[in-house]
Amino acid sequence: MIARLRCMTCAPALNAIKAALKLTFASLILSASPAFGQADAITIDVNADIAPRCGFIGASPLSATAPRDLESAAQLSFRLKLDCNTPFSFGVTAANGALLNQDALNDGSGFAFAKTYYLSVGIDTDRGAIASERCASSELVTGGTCSFASTVTGEGLSSRNGIAIDRDATLQVEWPDQRELTRRLAPGRYRDTLILIVGPRT
């Protein structure tokens, strides 16, 4: 079974900080014979702007091979670096909403051809760690009921007032032992894809 993470960002990541400097010189009025001890003054105003940015550092599709027997309980952890200089939100959706059998369809044999897994998200910010609720994969589909299920930039798990420059986002994926469930799994390869999105909070 292969669980793959495909990372997306709708905010410009890692753009160079743009700073605009404006120098304003006060006009000088010089007399032919300035009074003794009179000082001339020059005023310089310096203004700089730093554009907000939020994205993944070195993000690329990630994959993980689970323990050989999917019927056994397991836990997988994924860690990604963030670069967000403004408060942001982290959204996740699941393409299938379960680990689906890639080799066979439900044939009415009594076996299960999909396995539900559970996901929780943690983000590290300059104001402390933010932890999500634990959601079932079925709640992570587009429009799902999980609080951080989102395909929209700026929606999902909020960093509140925190920022994350070179800090981690961690995804924890887990599933139970199949023997605790009502049906055993049919043989085959199982897969789902998680889509991640991060951007300035709306």
Image (cartoon, rainbow, N blue to C red):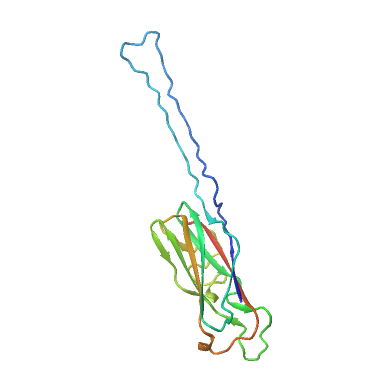
Please tell me which residue lies in front, 22 or 125: 125
In the image, what residue occupies the spot 54% across and 72% down? 140
To which quarter of the image does residue 58 belong? bottom right
Q: Is residue 142 visible?
A: no
Residue located at (52% from left, 59% from top): 198
Please indicate whether residue 122 sits to the left or right of residue 67 in the image: left
Where is 19 relative to 174, above or below?
A: above
Work out which quarter of the rendered image holds the N terminus and state it: bottom right
Q: Is residue 27 visible?
A: yes
Farthest residue toward the top? 33
Q: Nearer the viewer, residue 83 or 145?
A: 83
Marker count (numbered)? 0
Query: 131 above or below 86?
Result: below
Image location (x, y in percent) of residue 180:
50, 88
Give the image location of residue 100, x and y in percent.
62, 78
- Where does residue 67 sit, x and y in percent of width and height? 56, 78
Classify 170 as above or below 202: below
Q: Is 167 positioned to the left or the right of 102 in the image?
A: left
**Residue occupying the far left of the picture:** 37
Residue at 53% over, 74% down: 139
- As drawn, is 191 to the left or to the right of 173? right
Extreme-front residue of the structure: 68
* Rendered location of residue 125, percent (x, y): 42, 58
Q: Which quadrant of the structure image shows residue 188?
A: bottom right
